Image (tube, rainbow, N blue to C red):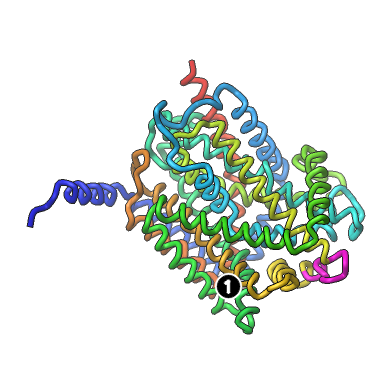
């Protein structure tokens, strides 16, 4: 039987990609995560107490650093997009974008939000209604507007700017400087020099792996109760850990198949499906809910956010020490920072052929507009239920938690059972999309070198699919999932420095190459 040249070439490519996989990074990463997971599961109470104490110390001692780096990232990204450097193309002059704007936007948006947006979009205002910023009086009509505005702020331009910094830094190095290495440490070379080739660089890269797996646990911890609550109501059963495990396994099957298919056939199509289904739910709530009230309150909240953006960005409450900015804004920025290197690598992979300005504006506009839509529609519907005495949202959120509260809110809609089925399916698809993107990025990061447009080895992608699924699943049964969430957020502190190094690197390389 003759072997065609194409078949021989395909086999050679597969062998090359397998050889290109960094097995050492795979093994060490899993050992680090497994060790942390075993310790957290073996000593859940001690681990929770210790990590909670560290987290409180971190948010109170370094609140200024988190707030400053978030604001600096936003200013830097806006300046860069408006400067002459914004016209720099990520690739050769003749290179055209690999993905259309809708495909690119859908992948960026769903990779960055997981299932937390639907959960918090409808409920975050209820926390702020009772626990207020700026010394405002709680439980007053004003706090409906302020509460929704703060949610829009927390998922707004600053959050997406924190994602944009590593995206631009890594994309420029990869496509313009032609350094075909998917390493977070490489994006700090302009600031740290050859130190990124030694222990410092390895620490940065392993920190990225820990952060992304911990962030996956956080997404599971937020999304699974909402999905489980929706399914339990439809099936007429009580939510339980086995239902949560079934949801995780279902997500695993979906994103493993998608990851095996690759970026174009897998992640892109999954992102499209997730975007359309999730958007359909929001449109339905907008159409059958109090549409005029939702629009009016949305305008009030957006106006409040814009009017107070600088104050909300830099307020530490150093005198009154209410703890509000530390518990909310600093926590959110630490959460975004833990995700940021992953988003940077993922956006790098899908941004070939785009200009720096397009990447920045696309992330800031697509991301902010999408998140604002969720907060305005879902939050507005929940607030209307509260004002008219139809559902005690504030009491539910503060006593039962966000997942039961959002499920009760969806139950008030016409055809609620169909809505809850859609919510469950949408949540599963969003989680699967995030994990799919994470597995793909970690496969890229554990490849020694990847040419432009080249896929990491399929076995490498499936390896990380298994790692993402097995560790959170084990922690779910062993009771360490919530503690792992806290551990992941702690990664945000060293990433504050890494973000500064990335901004220095980007500016230095752009100026050097333009000279």
State the residue in front, 164 or 422. Answer: 422
Residue 24 in magenta stretch: no
User: What residue range appears in magenta?
Assistant: 386-396
Judged left or right of residue 106, residue 30 is left
Can residue 304 be seen here? The reply is yes
Q: Position of residue 467 (x, y in %)?
A: 43, 62
Q: Residue 85's quadrant in the figure?
A: top right
Is 388 part of what is drawn in magenta? yes
Q: Is residue 216 above or below residue 303?
A: below
Which sits in the foreground, 64 or 117? 117
Residue 280's x, y, as percent? 62, 60
- SS at mark 1? loop
In the rendered view of the protein, which quadrant contains the N terminus? bottom left
Residue located beneath label 1 in the image: 479
Category of crowding for the residue at label 1, using alpha-carbon neighbours closer than 10 angstroms: few (below 14), some (14–19), many (at least 20): some
Q: Residue at position x 25%, y 51% from top?
A: 14
The one nearer the camera, 400 or 298, is 298
């Amino acid at each position: 039987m003759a072997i065609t040249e194409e078949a021989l070439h395909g086999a050679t490519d597969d062998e090359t990609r397998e050889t290109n996989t960094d097995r050492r990074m795979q093994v060490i990463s899993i050992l680090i995560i497994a060790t942390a997971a075993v310790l957290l599961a073996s000593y859940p109470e001690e681990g929770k107490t210790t990590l909670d104490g560290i987290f409180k110390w971190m948010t109170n001692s370094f609140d200024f650093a988190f707030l400053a780096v978030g604001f600096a990232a936003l200013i830097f990204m806006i300046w860069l997009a408006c400067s002459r450097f914004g016209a720099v193309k990520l690739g050769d002059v003749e290179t055209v974008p690999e993905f259309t704007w809708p495909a690119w936007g859908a992948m960026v948006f769903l990779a960055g939000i997981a299932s937390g947006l639907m959960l918090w979009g409808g409920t975050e205002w209820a926390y702020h209604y009772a626990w207020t910023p700026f010394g405002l009086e709680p439980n007053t009509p004003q706090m409906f507007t302020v509460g929704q505005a703060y949610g829009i702020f927390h998922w707004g331009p600053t959050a997406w700017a924190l994602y944009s910094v590593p995206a631009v830094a890594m994309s420029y190095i990869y496509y313009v400087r032609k350094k075909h290495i998917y390493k977070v440490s490489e994006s700090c070379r302009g600031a740290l020099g050859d130190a990124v080739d030694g222990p410092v660089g390895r620490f940065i890269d392993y920190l990225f792996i820990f952060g992304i797996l911990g962030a996956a646990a956080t997404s599971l911890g937020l999304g699974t109760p909402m999905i489980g609550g929706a399914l339990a109501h439809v099936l007429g059963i009580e939510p339980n850990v086995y239902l949560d495990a079934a949801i995780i396994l279902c997500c695993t099957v979906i994103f493993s198949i998608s990851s095996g298919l690759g970026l174009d056939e897998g992640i892109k199509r999954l992102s499209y499906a997730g975007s359309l289904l999730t958007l359909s739910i929001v449109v339905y709530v907008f159409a059958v809910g109090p549409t005029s009230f939702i629009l009016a309150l949305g305008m009030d909240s957006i106006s409040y956010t814009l009017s107070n953006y600088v104050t909300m960005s830099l307020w530490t409450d150093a005198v009154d020490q209410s703890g509000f900015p530390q518990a909310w804004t600093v926590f959110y920025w630490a959460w975004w920072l833990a995700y940021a290197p992953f988003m940077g690598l993922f956006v790098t992979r899908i941004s070939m052929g785009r200009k720096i300005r397009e990447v920045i504006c696309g992330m800031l506009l697509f991301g902010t507009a999408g998140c604002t839509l969720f907060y305005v529609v879902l939050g507005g519907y929940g607030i209307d239920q509260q004002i008219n005495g139809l559902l005690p949202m504030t009491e539910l959120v503060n006593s039962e938690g966000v997942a039961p509260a959002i499920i009760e809110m969806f139950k008030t809609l016409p055809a609620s059972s169909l809505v809850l089925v859609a919510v469950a399916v949408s949540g599963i698809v969003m989680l699967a999309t995030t994990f799919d993107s994470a597995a793909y990025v970690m496969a890229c990061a554990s490849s020694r070198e990847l040419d432009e447009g080249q896929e990491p080895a399929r076995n490498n992608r499936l390896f990380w699919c298994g790692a993402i699924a097995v560790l959170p699943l084990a922690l779910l049964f062993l009771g360490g999932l919530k503690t792992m969430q806290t551990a992941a957020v702690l990664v945000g502190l060293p990433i504050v420095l890494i973000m500064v190094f990335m901004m220095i690197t980007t500016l230095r390389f752009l100026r050097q190459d333009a000279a």
